[in-house]
Amino acid sequence: MTPAIRIDNLGKKYHVVNGSPRGRYRTLRESLVETASALLRRFGGQAPARTEEFWALKDVTFEVKPGDVVGIIGRNGAGKSTLLKILSQITKPTTGHIEINGRVGSLLEVGTGFHPELTGRENIYLNGSILGMSKKEIDRRFDEIVAFAEIEQFLDTPVKRYSSGMYVRLAFAVAAHLEPEILIVDEVLAVGDIAFQRKCMKRMDEVGKGGTTVLFVSHNMPAIEALCTRGILLEGGRLILDSGVPEVIGDYRRRVMSSPIPGGASPFDRSGPDRNMPILRSATLLDASGEPTNYLPLGSAFHIRIGLDVSELLRYPTIGVGIDDTLGQRILTLHTPVSNAAIEHVAGRCSVDCRVDPFPLAPGEYWVKLAISAGGPLDSIERALQFSVLNGEVFGEGRGFLRGFCIAPSNWTINPISSNGTNG
């Protein structure tokens, strides 16, 4: 079978000048500033700018079969977006060879492939033409694209006047509905709201099951688990692992977990609507032994330590902790008791520990929301803390691929059926 994508010893090198990579696309202003700076250094007797080589990708080799749905994961700077830009022919590789067999639809950044002066309608036809489709073929999918993007009212408005949400809705609708044989999607879906993200995930699932080859880059591990049949892990520009999704995600999380993390609490920006009293100052996740961490094994106990700075005595405050998944769905709610309050009063600088007995949050990424009230809302933080729950062997179930909101211990028995059809 001819592969949809073949990559052989792919490399992309940039020249870093005083910390700024050269070789990427630069605006006219950036080019003028760089030229002027070089002239000033030359005639001012200063040392020339220090240039270093930086390999965003190095010696990457793999193949993708037609119909594969591949999740590409890795930390920021691993080379994921560079790889997709090369495959989308936005940038050229420094070394190596790529072979692509099929029409490619790409959604890498908001507005990629759109002309800002053209209307939404005109950009649909422009993108279809780039994919090699005839007007008749585009006409056949046109109404479906517009309905998915929900931009009927602004269809004949230049896209430069679109909001970022409208832009990305139309861009995804075009990329996913104009029948590409290879669909490439970067983390751009994070721009949309939750309802749009769900709709995009459903559409990508349909596209993948329909035989389209999909390359999907995301930091959303549940999305990778739900959509992809294969995973690729990049680190430092190199391919570390190409295997099944559970193995790749497990290796990625182990690598992240083994990296040093900053200990102690850290302040956060206040973005919640309740700002009457800026009381909430920090949040720290502690493991079962009381050590700061951003990663928890499945089924472990944990603490959330909340730093407070209270200018006035608060009697019987209610402190709430909400744990949400990456799509904003509430998974777990914790709060001080409504009656017989565990905290009689708080004042000055202090911290409060919320201790949770072993709780089987499923493997994945989670956000912590904080709120405090006393006779009314006082302060809240939407995203105070992020942490991951790691897969592993727990509850005696063996090492498996676990999905869902919670993975709970359970007892299993066999109930024989008697001859009269009742449980024996």
Image (cartoon, rainbow, N blue to C red):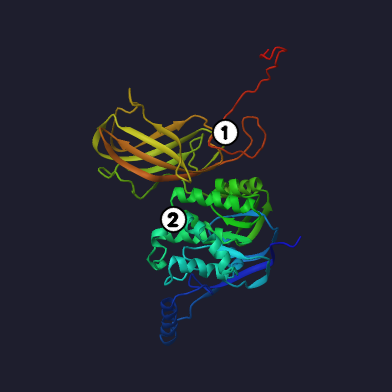
Residue situated furthest bottom in the rendering: 43
Q: Is residue 10 above or below residue 405?
A: below
The answer to which image quadrant residue 337 occupies is top left
The nearer-to-camera label among 2 and 1 is: 2
Q: Residues within 10 Å of mark 1 (few under 14, many from 20)?
A: some
| Front residue of 417 and 366 | 417
Q: Position of residue 323 (x, y in %)?
A: 44, 39
Could you tell me if residue 77 is visible in this image?
Answer: no
Residue that carries the numbered disc 2 in the rendered image: 150
Quadrant location of residue 33? bottom left
Q: Which is nearer the eye, 109 or 389?
A: 109
Q: Is residue 247 visible?
A: yes
- Please indicate whether residue 307 sits to the left or right of residue 275 in the image: right
Secondary structure at numbered mark 2: loop
Name the residue type under label 1: Ile
For image coordinates 61% across by 48% down, the residue present is 249
| Distance (Cα) linking label 2 and label 1 | 37 Å
Task: Measuring from the top left, give residue 11's x and y in whole percent.
Answer: 64, 68
Residue 63 lies, with reference to residue 301, above or below; the image says: below
Task: Name the residue beneath numbered marker 1.
Answer: 407
Does residue 376 appear left or right of residue 56 in this picture?
Answer: left
Can you give x and y, in whole percent of width and height, for residue 415 in the image? 68, 17
- In the picture as drawn, the residue positioned furthest to the left comes out as 312
Relative side of 129 to 276, left or right: right
Residue type of the residue flagged with mark 2: Glu
Q: Count numbered badges in the picture.
A: 2
At mark 1, the secondary structure is: loop
- Of the two numbered discs 2 and 1 on the same chain, state the one appearing first in sequence: 2
Label number found at residue 367: none
